[in-house]
Image: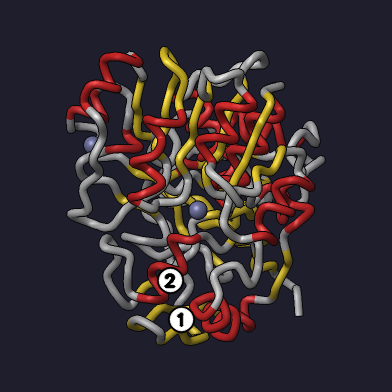
Amino acid sequence: MQAAVFHSPFDLRLADVPRPLPVKGEVLVAVDAAGICAGDLYIFVGKNPYVSYPRIGGHEIAGRIAALGPDTDGPAVGTRVVVEPFIGCGHCYPCRIGKPNCCANLQIIGVHQEGGFAEYVTAPVDRLHPTSDRLTPFQASFAEPVAIGVQACRRGGVGADDTILVLGAGPIGLAIVEVARAAGARVYVTDIARDRLDTAARLGAIPLEGGGSLLDDVLRITDGEGMPVVMEATGNAKVMEQTIDLVASGGRVVIVGLVGKGVTIAWSGLDLTRKEATITGSRASVGCFPESLDLLARGAIRYPEIATGLALSQAPAVFTDLARNPSALHKAVFLRNSS
Ligand SMILES: [Zn+2]
Ligand SMILES: [Zn+2]
């Protein structure tokens, strides 16, 4: 089968590799669509700390069941599915309390094992979600990034009456914008990149230019109270430190962006108690795929409209472009039979 293989940093090659064989408990999925995520770009540029090379990337996968492993019960061959790419060990503390997304031994399809930038991928049968016929594979491949938005909004307790500020309008920031807006929240967004801010505005967020002081803008908008919910999706340490200033007393801060290993964040300790702010991390997603797929099937998420469909054969060129300019594409999805 054809696959795009990350051989080492900055060396992505199209290759003809053996089709994987599902073992007991697994299925073989014929990949119809596989989204490119920042995590894949990190594999390409050598900054993903979890990956080993060579590796087939791609964890935002929509396709059809092509075969079931031996002695495996699952959806019938031909059933359209998306793959939830996070595989917990089932034994560690986070797994025991129902949080396999932060499993101590987490395995991610497309990072720790072969992913969906290929014609076929294997996945555990319990990691599949059948999809509505109303969704094209292209749309269904957004289940994973939208689930990250669902997770962040759940962690922040975002409801219809909330006003939220999303820091960063990259792919994850946009997913949060979409899910929060679909929940009925009033969503502000800021980003240093003008085109990203414009895209967020097209999706219904209110852009904050950030020309002056972001804090001044936030205080003006909220009559001096600060933001009820602040979502950090830039991964920039300085921006992360600002969240405690931006959040209202009694409000919630959700940190979704990733800083580099060993990078520390300084917060005013007094503000933590004075504001009684809830500061929470949000990692990937757990149990969010059904809601994500439902939002997509209802047309509540417009994110796919700003994405580009590409052929897998374009992978080496696309990753080279993205490494030079990460916002060259808002979002891209490799499609079978796209040429
Ligand atoms: Zn992703
Ligand atoms: Zn575990």
Q: Nearer the viewer, residue 139 or 47?
A: 47
Question: Quick check: can you spot residue 7?
Answer: yes
Residue corresponding to mark 2:
56
In the image, taking residue 254 as reference, residue 62 lies left or right, namely: right
Label 1 Cα neighbours within 10 Å, binned few <14 / some 14-19 / many ≥20: few
Q: Quadrant of the N terminus?
A: bottom right
Between the C-alphas of marks 2 and 1, the distance is 10 Å
Q: How many marks?
A: 2
Left or right: 182 as drawn, with respect to 71: right
Percent coordinates x, y for residue 322 in the rendering:
55, 75
Q: Position of residue 211 (x, y in %)?
A: 61, 51
Identify the residue under disc 1.
Answer: 17
Q: Ligand 2 falls in which quarter? A: top left
The residue drawn where x is 45% and y is 66% is 40
How packed mark 2 is, by other alpha carbons closer than 10 Å (few <14, some 14-19, many 20 or more), is many
Mark 1 residue type: Val
The picture places residue 57, in percent across and down from the top left corner, at: 45, 67
The image's colour scheme reads secondary structure
Numbered disc 1: secondary structure: loop
Query: Residue at 38% of width from left, 70% of height from top?
Result: 43
Q: Nearer the viewer, residue 304 or 203?
A: 203
**Residue drawn 30% across and 76% down?**
53
Q: Are marks 2 and 1 in contact (CB under 8 Å)?
A: yes
Which label's residue is closer to the chain start, 2 or 1?
Answer: 1
The amino acid type of the residue labelled 2 equals: Ile
The C terminus lies in which quarter of the figure?
bottom right
**Relative to 295, does residue 134 appear above or below in the rendering?**
below
- SS label for mark 2: strand
Establish if 210 lies above or below 14.
above
x and y, in percent, of residue 181 in the image = 70, 30
